[in-house]
Image (cartoon, grey):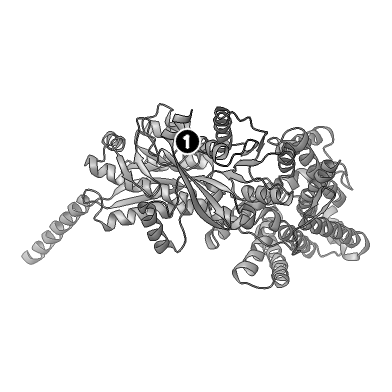
Amino acid sequence: MNRLLYSIAGCLIGTALAASVAHAADPIRIGMVAPSTGGAAETGRYQINGAKLAAKEINDAGGVMGRPLELVIEDDQTTNPGAVLAFNKLASDSSVVAFLGPIRSTQVYAIEPSVRKVGKPMAFGGTDPKLTHLGDPWMFRFRPNDKISTAAMAGFGVNDLGKKKWAIVYSTDAFGTSAKDLLVPALKDLGVEPATLQGFTSNSQDLTPVVLEIKQSGADVIASFATVQTDQAILAKQLRQFGVAAPVIGSASLISATAMKLAGPDLYGSYALTDFFGEETDAAKAFSASYEKAYGNQPDFFASWSYDAVHVLAKAIGDAKSTEPDAIRQALLAVKGYEGAEGTYDFDENGDGLHAYSVVQNKDGKVVFVKRVEAAEIKAKD
Amino acid sequence: MDIILQLTFAGIGVGSIYALVALGLVLIYRATNVVNFAQGDFPMMGAFILVVCLLSAGLPYWLSILLSLAGMVVFGAAFNLGVYYPLRNRSYLPVLISTLGASILVQNIILAFYGPQPANLPALLPFRGFQIGSVFLDPQYIVIIGVSALLVVLQYLFFEKTLLGKKLQATSQDKEMAGLLGIPVKRMIMLTFVYSALLGGIAGILVAPIIYFSITMGNAIALKAFAATIIGGFGDIRGAIIGGIGLGLIETFGAAYISVPYKDGFAFVVLFAFLMLLPQGIFGEKIAEKA
């Protein structure tokens, strides 16, 4: 009888101990909103892989404050309502201490009010400059914003390539429209008036009217901001078909693995402004190598920003020695000179972490580095 | 002038795609009284089987196309048995929702097993296209226009000149009466689904080299095909063709001369106008009210 009592007591104590040990090693949970279904599911996989790789590296190195890091991923279905739903689901879990938001500006806009309400830091990849100027202290951008990229694009095209007749083609959503609205004044600063502006809706089957307009305008360079990769490929193909030989300068999605595979030779010779280039810095090279080892293919900027975001969030939590939202926020703002895969992170008071862009070129299917443009230099030109 | 010709070619090309899908839509609507919301997934499925056979398995193009067409026959039959048949005695609403569910299911099954990446299919003809004056002709569009025209002729002959075609017409006009006359109604409906899936599959195979394969490639096409059907009228296969090509032209010229961003809007402005002014479409139904 006694023995039975002892063993029961032993069991109880054992369970209690086990429970308290488990509590000490409770994971630190980071919520992630990313597309697993819908039009951007392909890019979502890169984002999720990048974040998972970072979490694994952190956990292999002992976690944060002795606790493992856990990613909780919700599908945003590539839609704004989907993003809001996914974010709210994550936000309702009080054990989630910080978030990784979408890379698409339109979806970041959609969930920003919820971020403000929850009051926890969110790392995001959307590059619309206004996103860090909404008066929401919880917004942290892990990619350089479009103001930098468009200024760099205008500077490179006008000064380095010597092109003065610009056609601007853009998706008529938040991404494309805001990029166009930034490029036009950036060109004006350099004394260039665009020859033609062509907006189109995403998922177009045919872009003949757009391409004809570009051809008639006599443009010698084409700035392209397409949200959907298949649109970009259709545009590139039709430009070549109609004999438009002007080089295309585009955003980073122009050299994404998907776009390059789809468009093939139609995009040879085009330039892209990218925040991530796998062979540029030691940090970028290390990330590319471990990504390729883990997943068997080359990463692109979709993977690099989420990889950096998880690492920087973990670092901030570790620096703060706390998972309190405000402590994490202060620690994020204090991040200076962190060498990530995307570049050097120096957070300013608005929550912008990166301040430089790289110009690369698609040379016969291989991306080669052209030059790096710092935000400070562009400002000096203004 | 060159520009007008170029735009006309583009409009007819893209319109032929709408027309092919619209044809399938009309056929199923006439046989079952239901708008099939998964119609856009037929082209997607046809292109997907082609992608798997050609790019993943490395089979020759002609064999891949044959396998894709065979796959669409099976898919059409399975679609009938799984999505329509169990609900055939219910009103149109459960069937409509069932087709909507099937669309989501099919897209997500492919997403789960194949993944989200789009794919680039090589064109049917190996050359890049040619120039007539300053008008550029994409050979793939010529194939699309040619195949569409051929299918329309064959379909016309089939429906109007063969007994089987007449049985199918009788079934779509009055199921009960057709049954009383000894027409095997279930088999006719099965045949309709198979043929409609086949048409969609052909559209997918033809269009994928131009707009690339992606899981959502059918969504925008199906919406336009639906608009084309309203414009052309549900009663006649000519309606689907004229509606589809008309829509392609309206879109392309609207985009060129009015506004590119509102390109998709034109389709629906025209749709709205037809619903208001000519709800039965250009070609009304053979019988005004269906039982």
Determine which quarter of the picture holds residue B191. bottom right
At a point 44% along the width and 30% down the height, the residue shown is A380
x, y (%) of residue B44? 66, 57
Q: Is residue A347 left or right of residue B96?
A: left
- Residue at the left extreme of this rendering: A2
Q: Secondary structure at mark 1?
A: helix
The answer to whether one can see residue B155 in this image is yes
Q: Is residue B232 above or below residue B124?
A: above
- Pick whichever, A311 or A147, lies toward us: A147
At a point 79% along the width and 43% down the height, the residue shown is B247
Q: Residues within 10 Å of mark 1 (few under 14, many from 20)?
A: many
- Pick whichever, B267 or A356, lies toward us: A356
Q: Quadrant of the N terminus of chain A?
A: bottom left
Q: Amino acid at mark 1?
A: Ile
Q: Is residue B48 left or right of residue A322?
A: right
- Pick whichever, A33 or B143, lies toward us: B143
Q: Is residue A351 above or below residue A18?
A: above
- Pick whichever, B37 or A148, lies toward us: A148
The answer to whether one can see residue B291 in this image is no
x, y (%) of residue A122? 38, 39
- Residue at the top extreme of this rendering: A135
Q: Is residue A13 left or right of residue A362?
A: left
**Marked residue chain, label 1:** A
x, y (%) of residue A366? 53, 57
Q: Give the residue pinned by disc 1.
A: A148
x, y (%) of residue A329? 30, 35
Q: Is residue A313 left or right of residue B235?
A: left
